[in-house]
Image (cartoon, rainbow, N blue to C red):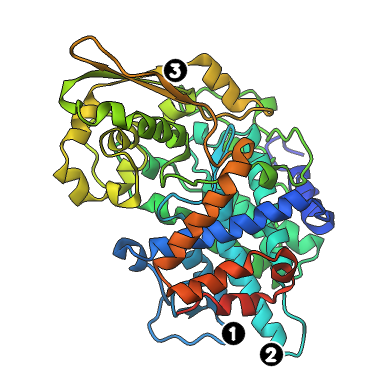
Amino acid sequence: MSANVDFNQRPDYDPELQAIADYVLDYRIESREALDTARHCLMDTLGCGLLALRFPECTKHLGPLVEGTIVPHGARVPGTPFRLDPVKAAWDIGCIIRWLDYNDTWLAAEWGHPSDNLGGILAVADHLSQQRLAKGERPLTLRDVLDAMVMAHEIQGVLALENSFNRVGLDHVVLVKVASTAVVAKLMGANREQLLSALSHAFVDGQSLRTYRHAPNAGSRKSWAAGDATSRAVRLADMAMRGEMGIPGVLSAPQWGFYDVLFSKTNRDQAIKPEAERAFRVSQPYGTYVMENVLFKISFPAEFHAQTAAEAAVALHTQVRDRLDEVERIVVTTHESAIRIISKVGELANPADRDHCLQYMIAVPLAFGDLTVEHYEDDFHLAHPVIDLLRDKMEIVEDERYSREYHQADKRSIANAIQVFFNDGTHTDRVAVEYPLGHRRRREEGIPLLKEKFRRNLATRFPAQRGERILALYEDAAQLEAMPVNTFLEHWII
């Protein structure tokens, strides 16, 4: 046989895919902490979606692709009148969830927002529940949704622990696509072969580049990219359920597989990684770790690496607000990931650019005492030139301890410190915040405030009485978990 002829023996599915499939099909979630956190996550995530509906740049993307389309048992998009096919509904729900960068976060070698997966989960669960009722069968319940959320968080988060997709130029929404594919395929009733097939297609798909998250190309695609990913997951799972064959060696195939094509180079010097380093590193089994440790964005609609920086800036506001024209320099001590991802100088072209700029997210609360979604808008930025004046006076310094403890499993801090120096030689206190309000270490402090955030977001879309009814759904965990998904969604439609 010629040496340059491929040996055409079909391999087994890559073990990384098999581990995900076995987890989704066989694992039983018993952690009360994980389920309670998932309930709070569901509450917060949908609230973020309601808030996003105030912005025309978001809502212009919503609705059926063909106006007037009627979909039998169509999935509902919360806060809207839309009933859509599950693929487009997943896109719309994912879009509103992520639009304002206000939903939960996971930070590790890779980062992302695991609640982005709710777009696919909720759309599929609502559609299937209505279908089942029409056939006289039992609908899915909110416990099915919460289980799927815990699993999607776990898949996305565990794969992110030691595998940096951003360093090879890929966007983290690849993990949304993979996690959503796994759990929505299960909701659809996939067997092991169907689930493996769906997962293989999630990896063989072309993956999003991170171009739209970084200067000078940061833009609004970052606000709908996760909706696109979770929507694609629904489509791939549906194809697998129809019998589409999988690609067993999608990760490991020499030359043509994901590892060799997309995961083999660094994005800094384009050096080829040793073959042993190209495969994913998964150092712990899939369970409930990620949901239990997920980070909520409670105080600020800001990229998470800046959450503690914004908190420190708010604390300094009273010492700075009357001396803004006297500021000589502002020293910001932070961690390596914040510097690499969101530290930027120069003109900021749009709201998506501003909510991913560490300096902007410090300057606004220093000057105004808060940071809200409105503070990123063009009219606010143009009306307040002091923001850019303060940005120009910032010195960004890495603290090696902050960088190290960002990755430590028993800490996972997201630390920032700020100190302001004035022209007369005086200075403010140095304010350091190492754990944001949404961190597991601050859960007791954070959950009541998370509920208040949810109440405010409900008020942007629903009358007070209806908002209180929705709030009440979350107070009784057992009742919520037993509720049919279609009944739950009826509370959310306009």
* Amino acid of disc 1: His
- Which label sits in the foreground, 2 or 3? 3
Question: Picture quarter containing residue 312?
Answer: top left
Q: Quadrant of residue 482?
A: bottom right
Q: Amino acid at mark 3?
A: Glu
Mark sitting on residue 398: 3
**Between disc 1 and disc 3, whose residue precedes?**
1
Can residue 201 be seen in this snapshot?
no
Residue that mark 1 sits on: 73
305 vs 174: above or below:
above
Name the residue rendered at 67%, 84% in the picture: 131
Q: Residues within 10 Å of mark 3 (few under 14, many from 20)?
A: some
**In this orientation, which residue lies closer to the viewer: 279 or 74?**
74
Quarter of the image with the C terminus in it: bottom left
Name the element at disc 3: strand
User: Residue shown at 39%/35% (left/top)?
Assistant: 310
As measured in the structure, the alpha-carbon distance from the residue carrying label 2 to the one carrying label 3 is 59 Å
Judging by the rendered image, the residue that carries numbered circle 2 is 134
Q: Which secondary structure lies at badge 2? A: helix
Nearer the observer, disc 1 or disc 3?
3
Cβ–Cβ below 8 Å for labels 1 and 3?
A: no
Instruction: Please say if the residues under marks 1 and 2 sit with CB atoms less than 8 Å apart.
Output: yes
Q: Nearest the camera: 28 or 274? A: 28
Determine whether label 2 and label 3 are within 8 Å by CB: no
The spot of residue 405 in percent (x, y) is: 59, 22
Of 250 and 326, which appears nearest the observer?
326
Q: Where residue 114 sits in the image (x, y, percent)? A: 59, 50
The CA span between labels 1 and 3 is 53 Å
